[in-house]
Every structure is written in structure tokens, then in C-alpha cells.
Amino acid sequence: MATKTTYEEVGLKAGLEIHQQLDTHTKLFCNCPTRLRDKKDSSISFKRYLRATKSEMGEVDAAALEEVKYRQTFLYKGYDSTCLVEYDEEPPSELNPEAIDTSLEVALLLKMNPLDAVHTMRKIVIDGSNTCGFQRTALVATDGVLQTDEGPVRVDSLCLEEDAAQKLEPEGNAVVYSLDRLGIPLVEICTAPDIRSAEQATKVAGQLGMILRSTGKVKRGLGTIRQDINVSIAKGARVELKGVQNLRLVGEIVNNELNRQLKLIELKEVLNTRGAWVEHRIEDLSCFFASTASKVIKNAGGHVFGICLHGFAGILGTEIQPERRFGSELADFARMYGAGLMHTDELPAYGISELEVEHLRRVFDAAEEDCVVIVAAVREPADKALNAVMARAEEAMQGIPKETRRALPNGSSAYMRPLPGAARMYPETDVPPVEIAAQKLEYIEAHLPETFEHRKARYKDKFQLNDELADKISRNVNFMLFERVMDSYGDVSATLVVRTLTDMLVELMQDGVEVEPLANQHFMDLFEQLAANAFGKEAIPAILKLLANKPDMSVEQAITEIGLNVDTAEVTRLIVGIVDTKRDFIRDKGVRAVGPLMGIVMKELRGKVDGKVLNKILEEQVAAVLAEG
């Protein structure tokens, strides 16, 4: 992680966009369910070709123009749970009222100002993720704020929008999307660029996630929340990093983008010092690879085309992110047209010989400080790929381009498209605006859920939990069950209940136990029996494991099957017997004999009787021996 001083020196600014699926019964603009399907269940498929359109200002968005260049075919998979709205064959219905109410609840939790009316807009997106070529989005609230240790972070906007279709593996030349996810309601929360460090970015993302989950009305699980991060530095440019699904990666991605931009600034200075330039000449080099051993070139039918980047030697091989070099940046552009890229910074390699590299250099009269770039593809995609590479190489000599990048699992990122602008938006004429009544806002505000922070403080005060345990259970889905147990069986240790509902369940799952069959009533009955001293706390994992495998079994039956039934008289007799054999030891040690003797007792009765009960009986028997003298 960079230091605070480093962040200040480079002028880091960052903002977050959080996209969270809402757990509504139906989708945003139709009555289809919001559940994902097994992709094998698809019973409908159709193809579409999307084109860029002008905004209400008469302009075409740069990101849309970029997508048009790829001329992709989109194949969509539908289900018996999707409808004509998803297929763009029927106008959308009105905005889902349940989704509006939940978005207003989140807005009020963030101290935002809801609008008097919610108007739906169209956001042009022609990457295939929506069948109609745009995403519907509606502004709900503005001007909120989050307090952090590093200072306040403004929350500029909260929008309600439809989720995109899910991308699947390609089929032939077609990009494939599944329509079960399309239309699930999302809230999009956008902060101002007030974040000044990677650590603060992580904290803000965590705070927003907690507020969303505190409603109890959002979906949980992988892919239900996605975070986009906007990052810029003083001498760099604003870059949007899309699709961060792991909160732990937020800070790492911010740092990696900061370092990427710093490295690109260094490379720009090197290129300018060298007087680097891009020769706009694409050569057909296929004749030099007629007998090549390269599988990459053979798979492309032996077609090879190339360009020369003068003064770029060593630049493409320079690492600018973990596991990614500047050559990887150029390869992102070539890949958009289905072409694989190679260059002389890394050759000979991939089956390409040293002699073949010499031929490449000779064609372009390339000097030692020059770099030859080649792609293995037929003429049309090769020309498009190399023209895109030349444009990006020229940008490298000017500065850092504003662009949208895809977050990668290792914390790095890859090019997606130019940064979109205002030209991508225009009004949605099929969906009427929704007026927000003052009475509705008053009702929602009066019934706002308790935040995690408030719940945590309450648990610490009421149940004397330490900070770690109070934090753990306040964020856990079982927090209401915890409260029920404590209200019903207050004599049970709150610490034990928390550990049972959190860590113990995780440990059972790690041991291969499927805990899903365990119902709330199982836990209520478990702690009822524990409060009645029917067994010792050490037996809880064994009981839960048995109940998970046999969910129809009662807790009492589980206690019997495990063999935990022991009456108090029998326990007392066992302890008296142990004490009788250790009278001399007791007289020698006095009350200090209780500890060692407790170990012997627990060996016989662990899990069958609560340790506190055993300790009390043992203390009474030891006291009786000492009283005899």
C-alpha cells in the first residue's frame, strides 16, 4: 500500500459506483421473477445486431462508436421465466413500486434528498448486455454524505436501474448472453471523487455495503453487488475500473491503477526523450512465415501483418501492473478484433525463430531502438487491430487516455472502451414518471431499519459482548435469531450464542457439513435444552451436525442418540466417587485441588453436563472433605 504522503503527492482522487441487486419479487419493468436459472434450462434463443444512436443532443457517444467497430453478433438465451420485455418485443411496464420503496429507504439511510418525481432515462449500451441497445435508469435521490475517519465523502446520486444480461461462453462468432439476470432491479450509488487513499476506498465500499444489507431487501451472494472505481491522479486522467466483485480487492485495484498511471507517465517521458514515432504502414508479412513452427500463426492460416513503432524498444516489455506489461495494453486492442498480438520485445518466442525476427526488422528497416508489432489474422481484422494499436501507441506519447477498464481477479485491469460521456443519455418515452408523495417518504423514514453500527453498540451495551463479537453478530444474517435466543434464554452465555451462530457454522461447513437444513427452531430448542442443563456446551457441534444430517429429528432426540442423557443424581455419585479416591490429594492441596479434579470429571462427562454445573458439584464435595479435617 502507498503511504498517505504518496497519495497527496500524486493527487489521488477516487470515487465509487456501487451496483446492488434488490431482492424484489419481480423485475424492474415486468412481472418476471428475479431468480437466476440453470443455463441448461434455456428454451428460447435469438440473434441481434446493435447500432449506435444519437442522444437527445444529437451526438453519438464515443464508447458506443467504439463498440460499433467490432460488428459483433449477439445471441440471447431466454427461459420460461423471461418474457417479451426482455426480448425487446414488448414495451416495458411501469417502474416496480417495491424497488422504488427500497431505493428510497437506502437514500434516506444515506441522508440523501429524494426527488419529487422519478423519471426514467435510456443509457446507450451496445456491448450486447441489453437486447434493446440501452439500459433504463432512473435518478431517485441526490446530495448525501458518508462520514469516514479521513473526512466526509459526498454521495452524489442514487439511481434505480435494470441489471444487464449475463455474459456466457461464446458460440462460434457470436457473443452469448443469458436473459435471466436482465431487468433485475439495481440501486446504483455514486460518490463524489472525495476519496484520497486506497484504504479509504475500501472503508467507503464497506460502509455502503453495510447500509445496503441493513435493509434486509438486497440479494446476497457472488455477483449480486458490483463496484466500479473511478481513479485519477494530478498528471494522469480519470479511468473507470468496472466489475470489482470482491471488497478486499478495492484498495489493491486503486493502488494498481495509481501505479499504472505513474508508470505510463514515465514511459511517455522516455518516448518523448527518444523522439519516438509511429509509422503508419501495415505490411503483409505472411511470406516470411511459410515454414514457421509457431502454432499461433499456423492457427491463423499463416496470415501475419505488422507495423513498426519507432523508438519503442523495451517499452512494450515494461511491466505497468502485476502480470501485465505495456504490450498487454496494446494486446487488449488487438483482441477486440479477434487478433493475437506479438512484438520484438518478447521475440523470438511462441515458436517464432530468430531468423524470422530478423526478416521482420529488415522489412521496416527497424533499428535497435525500434519495436515491430505483428498480429496473426486475416487482412480485415488485422488492419483494424493494428490501426487500434497504432492509435494507442500514439496516445502513449501524449499522456494517459480516459477510458473504461475491466477489473481482473488479481487486482490489475484491462482495456474495455473509451470513457462514456453525457451523449449516451436520452429520455425513456415508454415509462411514465413516478411521483413521490410526501406521505410515502414520511412512512419510510419512520420505519427505517437499524444500522449495523447502532446494532453493534446496542449489543455491546445490552449483552456485554466485546467489540469483535458484537461486530460479527450485528453483520450476520442470524442477528434476529441471536436476539430471540437471548430474550428467551437469558442465562445462556451471549458469547457462546454468537460463536455458535457464526464461527461454529463456518467450521461445520469447512468440515463438509451441509448446514442449510438447520432451521431457526433447531437453534431455539438447542439453547432451551442447554439452559436446562440437559447437556454441556462442548456437545453443541455434535448435536448440530446430527440435526443437519437429520433435520426432522428433535433436539431432545439428538441428545438421546448421542448419549448425552445423564441425571443429576448419577452425576453427583460419579463426582463423589472421584473425590473419595483423591481425599489425600484434596487435604494436601486444599481448594486448589478443584482444578486438577475438574479435568478428571470432564474426561468422564464432557458434553453431557454443563461445565458450570459440574464445577459447582465438585466444589461442594471438595469443601465437604476439607470440612471433615
Image: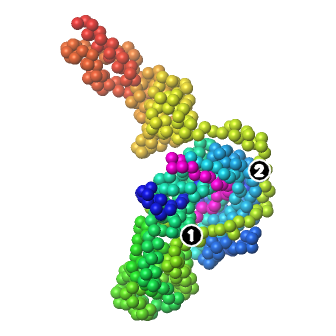
**Closer to the N terminus: mark 2 or mark 1?**
2
In the displayed structure, would residue 435 be above or below residue 61? above
Residues tagged 2 and 1 counted as in contact (Cβ below 8 A) = no
Three-letter amino acid code at the position of disc 1: Glu
Q: Residues under labels 2 and 1: Cα distance?
A: 34 Å
Q: Which residue is mark 2?
A: 116
Q: Position of residue 553 (x, y in %)?
A: 50, 32
Query: Badge 1 is on which residue?
Result: 403
| The label number, if any, that marks residue 113 in the structure image | none
Q: State left or right for residue 36 relative to residue 507.
A: right
Badge 1: few (under 14), some or many (20 or more) residues near its Cα, within 10 Å? some
| Residue at the outermost top position | 628
The magenta span reads 148-170
> Under tag 2, what secondary structure?
loop
Kindly tell me whether residue 145 is visible in this rendering: yes
Colour convention? rainbow
Query: In the rendered structure, does residue 444 fall within the stretch colored magenta?
Result: no
